[in-house]
């Protein structure tokens, strides 16, 4: 009997324990469910957190980054004007040369012979001109005298014929001699008509002058066989050796003048529109580990059709021959776009359905979507010419969650 009662109690205890366990599980599930609902409700009731920016009237600046390469003051390829054998090379790679220094000499032997031949021809032509002038003068005087004699003789025979002293045949014979002498005289006279020198003499003189110019041309060609440095600089390339044949127009030297260094940069059209020569800039050359002062000296007046960019040139103030051409250089310029105006960061602007708006955060932490009118732009800011006032606070983030009248929590945007 006791054994039966004991088994019954054990079963009741198991049942009671199971019931307690079920009650515990139910209570726990209910509690957790209620807590989750409360948290969800609290989350739904939480205010959006937005980053804000306070609008203040100030100078609106445009920041322009420039990058490019250093450019030498001169980079000149030197080539012979004529083909010829090289007889001397007087400059080595890396040599510092001065303007007028002889860098290379070509063979001038054949030219020297041609020059002497032309000089002799010019002298001979000059002598012929002198001889022609003397001969002309003598012939002119002789013909002039003969003409005067025949003229007087003809006039005298005309008188004799008028008084019947001579026949018509005699007068005609005298007249024929007179006309012949007159024609010879006029032929010589007409050679110098309107000119200081008779044509026959001038022809000889022009021949002498032509030979003189031919000689000077050969002398100029002879001088061109000496390749001369056109300015001070450093020999940056050499392809000339004694005995080699240098072809006309083929580069044999390259002269680099680093006494003045420039930086050429490519920029977009928006930047080209506001940059002007004369602006002071600082230029950093990373390879040199230094920053140099400079001045903007050139802004290209037209766009490069191939690159679709504009070029600006900066001249470094310091003359540094140690700076090499072709080094990467960078700079930046801040330009005043509009003095004392209102502007906001670009992320504050909302463009949707043909409207341009911003969300203004009021002092009671509620927001208002407000239409604005945009003025000037730069990379990070937009000018507001209507719709905002000095001191207004605008939202920069979470605008897609905002609605008119909504309360928000705010945090100042980092500058």
Image (tube, rainbow, N blue to C red):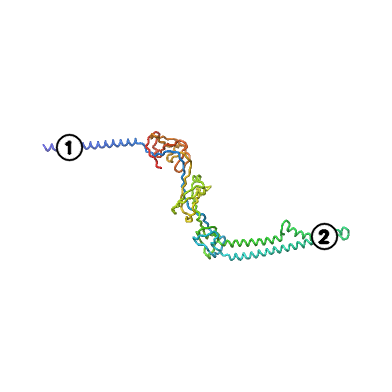
Q: In the orientation shown, which residue stands out farthest toward the left?
A: 1
Say how many tags the image has.
2
Q: Label for residue 152?
A: 2
Say which element carries label 1.
Answer: helix
Q: Quadrant of residue 30?
A: top left
Q: Is residue 318 visible?
A: yes
In this rendering, is residue 406 above or below 333?
A: above
Q: Quick one: quadrant of the N terminus?
A: top left
Query: For this view, does 248 lie left or right of residue 205?
Result: left
Q: Quick one: quadrant of the C terminus?
A: top left
Please give the name of the residue rendered at 70% of the width and 63% of the height, measured from the top-left corner: 130
Say which element carries label 2.
Answer: helix
Give the CA separation, mark 1 to mark 2.
183 Å
Residue located beneath label 1 in the image: 13
In this rendering, is residue 73 above or below 349?
A: below
Q: Position of residue 400 (x, y in %)?
A: 40, 38
**Observer-nearest residue: 40 or 202?**
202
Please give the name of the residue rendered at 76% of the width and 62% of the height, measured from the top-left corner: 141
**Observer-nearest residue: 362 or 398?**
362
Q: Position of residue 165 (x, y in %)?
A: 88, 60
In this rendering, is residue 323 above or below 26?
A: below
Query: For this view, does 42 lie left or right of residue 208?
Result: left
């Amino acid at each position: 009997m006791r054994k039966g009662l004991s088994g019954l109690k054990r079963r009741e205890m198991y049942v009671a324990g199971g019931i307690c366990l079920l009650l515990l599980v139910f209570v726990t599930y209910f509690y957790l469910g209620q807590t989750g609902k409360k948290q969800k409700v609290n989350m739904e009731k939480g205010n959006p957190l937005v980053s804000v920016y306070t609008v203040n009237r100030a100078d609106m600046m445009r920041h322009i980054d420039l990058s490019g390469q250093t450019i030498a003051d001169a980079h000149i390829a030197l080539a012979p004007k004529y083909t010829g054998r090289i007889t001397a090379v007087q400059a080595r790679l890396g040599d510092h040369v001065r303007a007028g220094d002889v860098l290379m000499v070509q063979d001038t032997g054949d030219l020297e012979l041609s020059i002497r031949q032309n000089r002799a021809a010019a002298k001979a032509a000059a002598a012929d001109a002198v001889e022609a002038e003397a001969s002309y003068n003598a012939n002119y005087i002789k013909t002039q005298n003969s003409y005067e004699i025949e003229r007087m003789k003809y006039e005298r025979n005309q008188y004799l014929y008028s008084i019947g002293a001579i026949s018509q045949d005699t007068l005609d014979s005298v007249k024929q001699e007179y006309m012949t002498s007159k024609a010879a005289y006029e032929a010589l006279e007409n050679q110098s008509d309107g000119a200081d020198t008779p044509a026959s003499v001038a022809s000889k003189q022009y021949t002498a002058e032509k030979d003189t110019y031919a000689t000077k041309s050969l002398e100029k060609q002879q001088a061109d066989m000496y390749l001369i440095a056109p300015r001070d600089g450093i020999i940056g390339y050499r392809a000339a050796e004694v005995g080699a044949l240098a072809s006309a127009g083929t580069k044999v030297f390259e002269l680099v003048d680093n006494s003045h260094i420039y930086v050429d940069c490519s920029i977009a059209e928006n930047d080209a529109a506001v940059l002007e020569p004369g602006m002071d800039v600082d230029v950093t050359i990373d390879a040199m580990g230094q920053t140099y002062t400079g001045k903007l000296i050139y802004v290209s007046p037209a766009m490069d059709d191939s690159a679709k960019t504009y070029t600006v040139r900066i001249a470094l103030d310091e003359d540094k021959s140690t700076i090499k051409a072709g080094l990467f250089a960078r700079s930046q310029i801040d330009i005043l776009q509009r003095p004392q105006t209102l502007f906001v960061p670009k992320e504050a602007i909302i463009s949707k359905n043909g409207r341009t708006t911003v969300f203004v955060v009021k002092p009671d932490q509620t927001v208002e979507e407000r239409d604005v009118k945009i003025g000037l732009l730069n990379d990070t800011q937009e000018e507001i010419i209507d719709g905002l006032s000095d001191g207004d606070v605008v939202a920069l983030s979470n605008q897609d969650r905002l609605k008119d009248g909504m309360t928000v929590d705010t945090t100042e945007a980092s500058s």
